[in-house]
Image (cartoon, rainbow, N blue to C red):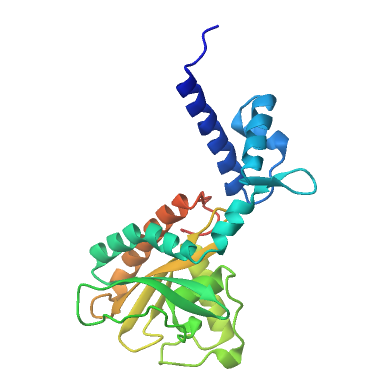
């Protein structure tokens, strides 16, 4: 039987090991040996040999039951501050497309404690409405589109009634009203804060998800109501959902259609 050249065989082994590693890393729970054999479509002996190599390289590890999970190398990487910079770099093309398509300020925020903090921004092409939100963490989440995303999908605990300060006449300022709003957020997959933080300011946001579906952060587009009137909000929301879904796919998340439009 003819054999593959050494270089080709080596490349094939790397490809197979990479596929196995992706199955382990992208799974929401530890993977059994049998499930990896079945999904990878490899012989048991080949799967065993490749998993042992990945284990020696600390790329996978076994738990007490013998199932495989991501190894210590990933824990070390995740602990580095560089990780957020890598995520922002991954987001940048999507943020640039949203900024180009809408002309407005685009932000990415993450939940922190009981609040929301902005970690990346692409400025509006207009002078009016451009604000540097990076590092700002004192915006009440119930007044922001990104905060509503984190409430709707369980990344922030719902606030008590005493925390729902009314910033404008349009602010969602009661728990029942906020809960009704969050039902709509989950249904359509995007959130809006229309003059709820400041008069004349509107923001729309959509979630970015990791492999296991957890919300990593939220992309938003914000600008003055003169440029994002009520009739334009749905189009902005749908554009955000489309870009957030692309980023989520790059992070290993596969849209199931069960979690709203995003």
Percent coordinates x, y for residue 19 in the rendering: 55, 37
* Residue 189 seen from this side: no
Which of the 4 image quarters holds residue 67? top right
Residue at point 61% right, 43% down?
Answer: 57
Percent coordinates x, y for residue 38 in the rendering: 66, 31
- Vertically, is 137 above or below 167? above
**Left of 107 or right of it: where is 212?**
right
Q: Quadrant of the N terminus?
A: top right
**Left of 34 or right of it: where is 210?**
left
- Vertically, is 131 above or below 213? below
Q: Residue furthest left?
A: 126
Of 247 and 135, nearer the camera is 135
**Left of 99 or right of it: where is 163?**
right
- Vertically, is 183 above or below 71? below
* Residue 9 seen from this side: yes
Of 94 and 197, nearer the camera is 94
Percent coordinates x, y for residue 20 in the rendering: 59, 37
- Count of numbered labels shown in the rendering: 0
**Left of 49 or right of it: where is 19?**
left
Residue at point 41% right, 85% down?
Answer: 196
Residue at point 32% right, 83% down?
Answer: 201
Residue at point 45% right, 85% down?
Answer: 139
Of 254 and 17, nearer the camera is 17
Which of the 4 image quarters holds residue 192? bottom left
Percent coordinates x, y for residue 184 in the rendering: 49, 70
Q: Residue furthest top?
A: 1
């Amino acid at each position: 039987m003819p054999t593959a050249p050494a270089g080709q065989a080596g490349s094939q082994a790397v490809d197979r090991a990479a596929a196995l590693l992706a199955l382990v890393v992208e799974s929401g729970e530890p993977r059994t040996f049998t499930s990896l054999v079945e999904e990878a479509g490899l012989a048991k002996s080949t799967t065993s040999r490749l998993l042992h190599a990945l284990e020696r390289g600390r790329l996978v590890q076994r738990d007490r039951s013998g199932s495989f999970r991501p190894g210590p190398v990933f824990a070390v990487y995740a602990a580095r501050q560089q990780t957020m910079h890598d995520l922002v770099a991954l987001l940048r093309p999507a943020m640039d497309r949203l900024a180009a398509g809408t002309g407005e300020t685009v932000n990415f925020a993450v939940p922190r404690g009981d609040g929301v903090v902005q970690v990346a921004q692409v400025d509006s092409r207009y002078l009016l409405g451009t604000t540097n939100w990076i590092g700002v963490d004192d915006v009440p989440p119930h007044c922001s589109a990104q905060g509503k995303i984190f409430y709707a999908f369980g990344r922030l605990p719902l606030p008590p009634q005493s925390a729902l300060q009314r910033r404008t006449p349009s602010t969602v300022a009661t728990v029942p009203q906020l809960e009704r709003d969050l039902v709509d957020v989950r249904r359509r997959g995007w959130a809006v804060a229309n003059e709820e933080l400041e008069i004349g300011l509107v923001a729309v946001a959509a979630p970015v998800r990791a492999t296991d579906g957890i919300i990593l952060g939220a992309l938003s587009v914000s600008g003055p109501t003169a440029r994002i009137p009520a009739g334009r909000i749905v189009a902005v929301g749908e554009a955000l959902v489309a870009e957030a879904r692309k980023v989520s796919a790059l992070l290993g998340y596969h849209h199931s259609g069960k979690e709203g439009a995003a």
